Image (tube, rainbow, N blue to C red):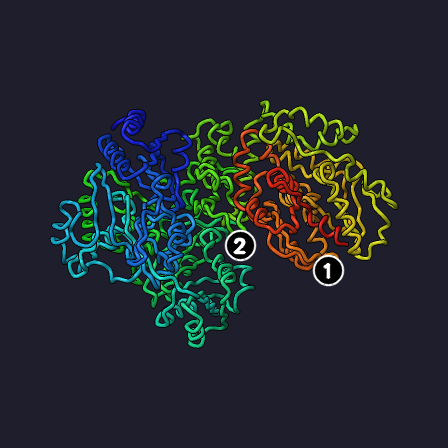
């Protein structure tokens, strides 16, 4: 076999696309969304079909396997391989053409499904199959898995919606296949005509979700029209590489309506699903209480639910009358429908978290049985789980008998892995006994291919092998998948990780890749740097993969000093969007802080870590020396070392009078216990609150503190402010990875503050988030940390909880601006929305991230990404706002970004309300 170095040189000589055999590229593609890990030789991003042919020719001559890969979200392990990975998303991601009259589109394999749907929406069309990963799954990946999604009840699987495929095989030969034998590889027709009997009588009874193995092989029978392209779908990259596809489009219902039906339990919902099919539903999705959790409050009464989408309101009402449900609801508002569907779409991630905080894993993600058998199957499935001491929360496409579930397997210890194997074998027997398919839409990969003989028998398994050999006689396409497969209990990704808490956190990333969405719309924040660069290493998943490989030490070999990991994390804004938006709660900001803590241990850090990370200490010293004016004047002439020159190399202007100095001058302010000062407590009928003098309010924007004081007093609350000693949330030390220093600062803060009287009002969202989340995590053994974290309230939360009868001034103005990303991720903005509504502030604040993100936008080399993040939602919203609109941004970073890039003055909500008093 050719050496990796020689292979890389030959590929570079013959391809125009990118070739990367470096550690980072390989580390990013060791895993998909499954339990498996295999290390590739290198990664190739072909520019077009000619590049694909060249790569397959070179690799075949070198004897190196090839794995085509789209979004890399395959759940069964088929997107992992040991050879050359073809990344088809980088360049081969275009919509070639649309024919609205014929209702077809020509697509390249790396095109994301949502981009196709967006392009054909103006014609009233869509692509029928719609997996929950529609924002990042690619058409090539859907063809490889024969993906289905929620609407397959109405529109079928991907195979049902593909008419032609351009395929290049290992060695570089191109084929154009559709219906009939034209374009098929030599020997395929003879193979099929020689095995008509087994294909006609040996295949399991057909139903819509028989996806496992080469389950569409009987499409090649003459009575089925010799559908070569259809049979190719679901081959999981084992036959060739799709370089172009002609797909069918369907008409989009003009006003679909969602009927939500509540049932006593999961079995009742499952047994009811098949009976709804004669009503012509577009979807019939099922889930039970153990998955829905607190969201059940938004649903009809019951312990399990069916989400049934109907083409119009009349059909939906007829369904409701016919359904034998405990309770029911009709949802016509599109926004409310989307909110409910998000519960279902995030299930692939939320199902990985058990109620006690444990993790559950894929492996038996999408078995399917005929819909009429679903109720009985689920009862036996639950019993099998209990017999093995396992837990999982089934949900999925009940209208087609397809069940998704993640199970709390122990995939680390030898006994746990043995139980995984035994359970898998017994579950395969159960599925087959009900006439089902081991895979109902995600493919078999490594998780189930070993068990296919239970479903198909030895004769058909031999035919599957012969079918692969016709297409791929050298066996170079994704070996070990479907035919002559790897064992289901080898190549497990957890085996390479050390037994440490940090490794356990990194393993949380299951690779569903919600962070790879490129749509900045809506309330989602994750992942701003990926949306700007489009590079996998800048996604939350990509960074988690690099950290995984750093801990494994096989590819990334220099541990915490890894330059590959450092470079990937450099563009992480630490926005914490992934903490809330990632279905499994990956918190890359926290992981970045931990990495930086180790990476720079015992070394001189970048200058920005001292300039920005030590900002509270420096601003405190300047205030003590009363040198703000002199520092401001000097900064206007001399750039501050360690700051980005494209921002002028200077920080925002310092306030002449810090907030606490202003506070100390107020009438009636007197020193209280532990350094708190304030007016007589009796002056506030609503009780006392502690107003936290965060660094940004204290030294950079005291106006927000003064305004908050005025509003809180107007609401009947007495205000106290810690003035003696130093209190700080430690945010800047955490964000630069100076965790030991952060712990010292936080202990000092707890000593200074003592037990706060009532709620602690924190005006700066990032500081509130740090106190609520980072403080107890950094000082888990100090009970004072948990108490302070529990006392923290935002400005709006305080007014809602402690002054509920207060009526804010009615401003009657349009408002635009930015919801701070840390507030979105950690604190929530429900009270803020309600307070704005009561104050007559109309409109919505922008989602996403402003791009400044604390120290990120001030650090050298980040300016371009920082501006691009702002251009996603924030700056367009400001430009589109009416001239008299108020601009709100509670985060100091957001206000600074708006001032520097938008040329406008934004204010804290407290300032807007204070002006209206």
Q: Position of residue 534 (x, y in %)?
A: 44, 39
Q: Give the number of marks.
A: 2
How many C-alpha atoms fall within 10 Å of the one at disc 1: few (<14), some, or many (≥20)?
few
Q: Quadrant of residue 478?
A: top left
- Work out whether residue 385 can be spotted: yes
Mark carried by residue 598: none
How many C-alpha atoms fall within 10 Å of the one at disc 2: few (<14), some, or many (≥20)?
few
Relative horizontal placement of residue 738, taking residue 4 as reference (left or right): right
The quarter in which the C terminus is drawn is bottom right
**What residue did someone put label 1 on?**
804
Secondary structure under badge 2? loop
Mark carried by residue 355: 2
Q: Quadrant of residue 102?
A: bottom left
Secondary structure under badge 1? loop
Image point (85%, 48%), residue name? 679
The quarter in which the N terminus is drawn is top left
Q: Is residue 315 above or below residue 636?
A: below
Image point (49%, 71%), residue name? 328
């Amino acid at each position: 076999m050719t050496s990796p170095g020689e292979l890389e040189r030959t590929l570079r000589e013959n391809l125009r696309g990118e070739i990367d055999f470096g550690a980072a590229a390989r580390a990013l593609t060791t895993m998909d969304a499954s339990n498996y890990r295999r290390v590739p030789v290198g990664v190739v991003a072909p520019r077009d079909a000619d590049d694909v042919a060249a790569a397959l020719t070179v690799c075949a001559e070198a004897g190196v396997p090839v794995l085509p890969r789209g979004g890399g979200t395959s759940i069964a392990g088929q997107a992992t391989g040991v050879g050359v990975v073809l990344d088809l998303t980088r360049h081969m991601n275009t919509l070639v053409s649309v024919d609205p009259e014929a209702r077809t589109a020509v697509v390249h394999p790396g095109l994301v499904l949502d981009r196709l749907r967006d392009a054909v929406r103006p014609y009233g069309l869509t692509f029928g199959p719609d997996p929950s990963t529609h924002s990042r799954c690619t058409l090539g990946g859907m063809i490889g898995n024969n993906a289905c999604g929620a609407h397959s009840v109405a529109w079928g699987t991907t195979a049902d919606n593909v008419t032609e495929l351009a395929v290049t095989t290992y060695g570089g030969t191109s084929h154009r296949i559709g219906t009939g034998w034209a374009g098929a590889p030599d020997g395929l027709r003879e193979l099929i005509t020689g095995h008509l009997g087994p294909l006609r009588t040996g295949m399991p009874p057909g139903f819509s979700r028989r996806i496992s193995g080469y389950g569409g092989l009987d499409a090649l029978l003459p009575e089925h029209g010799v559908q070569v392209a259809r049979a190719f779908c679901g081959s999981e990259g084992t036959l060739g590489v799709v370089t172009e596809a002609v797909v069918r489009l369907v008409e989009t219902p003009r006003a679909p309506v969602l009927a939500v039906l509540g049932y006593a339990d999961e079995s009742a919902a499952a047994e009811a699903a098949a009976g709804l099919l004669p009503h012509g539903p577009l979807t019939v999705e099922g889930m039970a209480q153990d998955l829905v959790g607190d969201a059940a409050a938004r649903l009809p009464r019951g312990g399990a639910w069916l989400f049934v989408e109907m083409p119009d309101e009349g059909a939906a009402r007829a369904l409701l009358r016919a359904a034998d449900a405990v309770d029911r609801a009709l949802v016509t508002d599109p926004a409310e429908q989307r909110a409910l569907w998000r519960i279902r779409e995030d299930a692939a991630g939320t199902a990985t978290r058990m109620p006690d905080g444990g993790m559950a894993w894929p492996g038996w993600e999408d078995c399917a049985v005929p819909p009429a058998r679903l109720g009985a199957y689920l009862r036996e499935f639950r019993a099998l789980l209990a017999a093995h001491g396992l837990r999982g929360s089934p949900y999925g496409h009940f209208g087609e008998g397809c069940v998704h579930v993640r199970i709390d397997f122990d995939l680390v210890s030898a006994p746990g892995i043995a139980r995984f194997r035994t359970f898998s074998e017994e579950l395969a027997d159960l599925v087959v006994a009900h006439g089902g398919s081991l895979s109902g839409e995600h493919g078999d990969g490594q998780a189930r291919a070993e068990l296919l003989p239970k479903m198909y028998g030895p004769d058909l398994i031999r035919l599957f092998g012969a079918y692969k050999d016709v297409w791929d006689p050298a066996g170079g396409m994704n070996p070990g998948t479907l035919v002559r497969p790897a064992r289901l209990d080898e190549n497990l990704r957890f085996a390479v990780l050390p037994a440490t808490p940090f490794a356990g956190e990194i393993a949380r990333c299951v690779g569903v890749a919600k962070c790879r969405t490129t749509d900045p719309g809506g309330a989602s924040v994750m992942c701003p740097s990926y949306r700007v660069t489009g590079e996998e290493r800048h996604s939350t998943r990509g960074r988690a993969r690099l950290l995984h490989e750093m801990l494994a030490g096989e590819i990334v070999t220099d541990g915490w000093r890894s330059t590959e990991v450092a470079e990937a994390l450099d563009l992480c804004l630490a926005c914490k969007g992934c903490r809330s938006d990632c279905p499994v709660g990956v918190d890359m900001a926290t992981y970045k802080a931990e990495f930086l803590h180790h990476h720079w241990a015992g070394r001189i850090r970048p200058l920005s870590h001292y300039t920005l990370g030590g900002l509270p200490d420096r601003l405190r010293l300047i205030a003590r020396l009363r040198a703000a004016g002199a520092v401001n004047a000097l900064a206007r002439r001399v750039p501050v070392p360690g700051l980005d020159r494209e921002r002028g190399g200077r920080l925002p202007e310092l306030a002449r009078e810090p907030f606490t100095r202003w506070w100390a001058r107020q009438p009636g302010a007197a020193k209280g216990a532990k350094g708190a000062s304030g007016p007589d407590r009796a002056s506030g009928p609503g009780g006392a609150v502690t107003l936290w003098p965060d660094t940004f309010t204290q030294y950079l924007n005291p106006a927000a503190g003064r305004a908050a004081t005025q509003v809180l007093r107007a609401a009947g609350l007495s205000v106290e402010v810690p003035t003696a000693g130093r209190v700080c949330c430690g945010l800047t030390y955490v964000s630069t990875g100076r965790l030991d220093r952060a712990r010292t600062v936080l202990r000092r803060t707890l000593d200074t503050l003592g037990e706060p009287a009532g709620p602690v009002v924190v005006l700066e969202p990032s500081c509130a988030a740090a106190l609520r989340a980072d403080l107890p995590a950094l000082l888990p053994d100090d009970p004072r940390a948990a108490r302070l974290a529990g006392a923290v309230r935002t400005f709006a939360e305080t007014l809602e909880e402690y002054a509920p009868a207060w009526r804010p001034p009615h401003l009657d103005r349009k408002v635009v601006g930015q919801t701070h990303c840390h507030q979105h991720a950690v604190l929530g903005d429900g009270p803020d929305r309600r307070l704005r509504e009561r104050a007559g502030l109309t409109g919505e604040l922008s989602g996403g991230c402003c791009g400044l993100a604390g120290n990120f936008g001030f650090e050298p080399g980040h300016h371009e990404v920082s501006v691009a993040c702002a251009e996603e939602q924030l700056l367009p919203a400001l430009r589109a706002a009416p001239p008299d609109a108020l601009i709100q941004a509670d985060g100091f970073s957001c206000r600074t970004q708006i001032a520097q890039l938008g040329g406008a003055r934004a204010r804290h909500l407290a300032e807007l309300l204070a002006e209206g008093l």
